[in-house]
Amino acid sequence: MSVFDTRIKYNNNMDNKLQNLLNRDDCYFIHYASSGFYDGSGSAPKISCILIYNPKNDKGYRFDIADNLEGNSKEQAEKLTLEKFKSVFTKIPNVSFIHWNMTAKGFGFKAIQARAKEMGVELPTIPEENLFDLSSYIGYIAGKNLSVKQILWFNSLLYGNDFLDGKTEAEYFGKGKYEEIYNSVELKVKGFAEIVNLIKDNKLKTDPPYQNNDGLTKEERHMEAVKRSQMREQMLQDIMEHNRRVMEKSESERVEEDAILYYNSEHPILSLFANLFANR
C-alpha cells in the first residue's frame, strides 16, 4: 500500500469515528483550565473549571471552582468541582469527548485525573474509543500543527477579548479571576463545535485570512505596526484637539469666520472630515 493510500484510509477512519461520535447522545465537546502544566511528577496543577457541551441537544455543563467558593476554602471548592465532574461518568456511563490535545503529557485528562486523586476523588480512565482529538485531526487536514487560537482566528470564531492562552489562564487562577477563565474556556468549547460544523460542510479554513508577502522580517513588521499605531494615536489626538477648538468658539466667532462648523460628540472623526470638506 502506498503512503497516499495509507493517508486516505486514515482520513476515512477519522471521518467515520468523528461522525459516529457526533451521532451519539452521550458525546460532548470538552475543555478545561488549570493553574499550570503537569510534568507527571510532583503536585498536579489545580483545576479552575471544566466545561462540556453536547451539540446534539445544545446542552452544556460547567464545573467551576467559582460556583463552590461560598462557605468553602479554595481547596474545598476545587474538590467539590471535581466531585461534580465525576458525577458525569455515573449519569452518562458511556460518555465520549471531542477534545483539543487533552491526551498530551502535560495537559488534559491525565492531569485532571492526577489532581483529582490528590484531592481524594477517583476519576475513571476514559477508553480511547470514546475520545477524539480534534487538534490532531485538524493538523492532518491542514498538513501542519495549528494552535487553538490560530484555528479560531482563521475561521472568525474569536469573539471580543474572551480568549486567553493557557499561561494567562494559569495566571488568572492565582488572581481569582474565575469568570474571565470560564469565559475563555466556554469560547473554546463552543468554537470547537462550530469548527466541526465547518469540517462537515467542507468550509474549514486552515490558513490566515491574508498572507504576508512584503518581504519584511518579523522584527521589521513589528516596527511598522508600532509606527502605524503611533500615527493613528496622533491623528486621534489631532482630531480631538480640533473638535475641542470648535466647541470653544462662540456663535459670533463662527459667524465672523464665515465658516460652517460641525461637531457631533459621538462621531468626532466624522466631525473633522465634515468641517474639512465644508470649508474647502
Image (tube, rainbow, N blue to C red):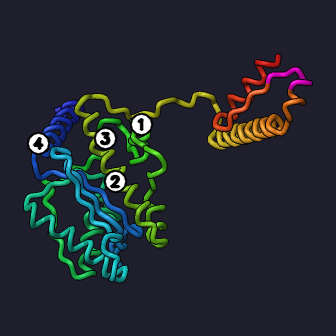
Residue 274 against residue 133 in the figure, above or below: above
Mark 3 and mark 4 residues within 8 Å of each other at the beta carbon: no
Q: Spatial distance from mark 3 to mark 2, Cα to Cα? A: 20 Å
The residue pinned by badge 3 equals 138
List x then y, in percent, for residue 166.
43, 59
Pointer 4: residues within 10 angstroms few (<14), some, or many (20+)? few
**Residue reaching furthest top?**
280
The magenta stretch spans residue 159: no
User: What numbered label is drawn on residue 108?
Assistant: none
List x then y, in percent, for residue 138.
31, 41
The residue pinned by badge 4 equals 23
Q: Magenta stretch?
A: 255-260
Q: Foreground mark, 2 or 4? A: 2
- Quarter of the image containing the N terminus? top left
The residue pinned by badge 2 equals 186
Q: Earlier in the sequence, mark 2 or mark 4?
A: 4
Task: Identify residue type, mark 3.
Answer: Ile
Task: Identify residue type, mark 2.
Answer: Glu
Residue at the spot x=30%, y=68% of the render?
A: 111
Task: Identify residue type, mark 1.
Answer: Ser
Q: Nearer the viewer, residue 183 or 213?
A: 183
- Quarter of the image containing the C terminus? top right
Asked whether residue 136 is in view, the answer is no
